[in-house]
Image (cartoon, grey):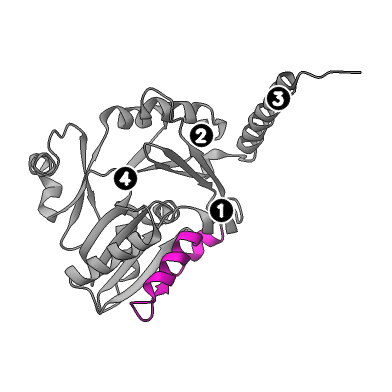
């Protein structure tokens, strides 16, 4: 009778699984013939890394990957570094790289701040006690507002050092730019909600003006719906058009809840330019999908 050591068997399965993961990553990077013709968008938070790569000249080229960062790493930055260096795809020389950072240190400010670095810093120090981050101002094309954001200094340095010719943007920037752009010819206020599995972004615009821009983390879909209805009541935006974008499951659940209170809730029309990149685009974070369209 042959007696097998279950620990050895489990170890063998883990080794095979690790080998397959490594080979999959290598094959994935080899799918990109000339990375200079490709664009890479990264969604970065303290717990996750979203990767969206595509070639504007090739249909169905889009590659999307989600990585949960190592929660046992000493710092979020070290977890991010490990995820990047363990993913060969990210080490290619892409023609354009955008890093969309999920920072809670973002405020809406008057457009004059764009030309006054000291005023931008003062606003951030007033809004966030103990503020020591890198300050960036994001013009949006709005007539009345810009975004001022803070990035962790070491994280920003790592991204610029690792990725050639990269740009950094707060999560709200591509959303504000895109929703302002698609509403240029609409003569009434519109409220957009971008739904993710753990957070929603609320952006309201009116004829080139930014009325609301904020991100809310939520535990249940009911909480997300509450934030939307509270903003509609307090802004006030109770009569404006309500459109929802985002990852399909979160978007559809939220739309179902909102339709109990708001007639005519509609999905945001998906940008045709990115749909051509591949059907997987529908499952990507919407802020990464519209980022290339706002550059």
Write down the residue under mark 4: 169
Q: Is residue 200 magenta?
A: no
Which label lies toward us, 4 or 3? Answer: 3
Q: Position of residue 167 (x, y in %)?
A: 34, 41
Q: Is residue 264 magenta?
A: yes
Which label lies toward us, 2 or 3? Answer: 3
Dot 1 or dot 4: first in sequence order is 1
Mark 2: which secondary structure?
A: helix
Q: Residue at x 15, y 35 (%)?
A: 131
Q: Calculate the distance from the C-alpha at mark 1 to the C-alpha at mark 2.
A: 20 Å
Observer-nearest of 150 and 260:
260
Observer-nearest of 169 and 5:
5
Q: Calculate the distance from the C-alpha at mark 1 to the C-alpha at mark 3.
A: 45 Å
Q: Position of residue 110 (x, y in %)?
A: 12, 55
Q: Calculate the distance from the C-alpha at mark 4 to the C-alpha at mark 3.
A: 43 Å
Q: Residue at x 24, y 58 (%)?
A: 213
Write down the residue under mark 2: 90
Write down the residue under mark 3: 10
């Amino acid at each position: 009778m042959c007696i097998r050591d279950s620990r050895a068997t489990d170890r063998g399965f883990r080794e095979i699984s690790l080998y397959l993961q490594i080979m999959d990553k290598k094959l994935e990077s080899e799918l990109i013939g000339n990375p200079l013709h490709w664009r890479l968008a990264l969604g970065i938070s303290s717990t996750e890394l979203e990767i969206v790569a595509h070639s504007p000249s090739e249909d169905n080229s889009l590659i999307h990957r989600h990585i949960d960062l190592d929660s046992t790493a000493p710092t979020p930055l070290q977890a991010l570094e490990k995820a990047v260096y363990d993913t060969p795809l990210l080490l290619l020389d892409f023609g354009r790289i955008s890093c969309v950072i999920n920072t809670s240190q973002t405020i809406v400010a008057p457009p004059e701040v764009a030309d006054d670095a000291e005023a931008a810093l003062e606003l951030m120090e007033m809004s966030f006690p103990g503020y020591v981050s890198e300050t960036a101002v994001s013009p949006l094309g709005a007539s009345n507002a810009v975004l001022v954001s803070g990035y962790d200094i070491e994280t920003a340095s790592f991204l610029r050092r690792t990725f050639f010719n990269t740009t950094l943007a707060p999560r709200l920037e591509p959303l504000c730019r895109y929703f302002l752009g698609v509403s240029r010819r609409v003569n009434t206020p519109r409220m957009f909600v971008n739904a993710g599995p753990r957070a929603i972004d609320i952006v309201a615009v009116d004829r080139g003006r930014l009325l609301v821009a904020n991100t809310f983390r939520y535990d249940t879909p009911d909480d997300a719906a509450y934030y939307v209805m509270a903003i509609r009541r307090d802004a006030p935006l109770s009569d404006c058009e309500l459109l929802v974008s985002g990852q399909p499951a979160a978007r559809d659940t939220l739309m179902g809840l909102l339709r109990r209170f708001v007639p005519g809730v509609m999905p945001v029309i998906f940008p045709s330019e990115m749909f051509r990149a591949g059907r997987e685009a529908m499952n990507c974070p919407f802020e990464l999908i519209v980022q290339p369209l706002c550059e």
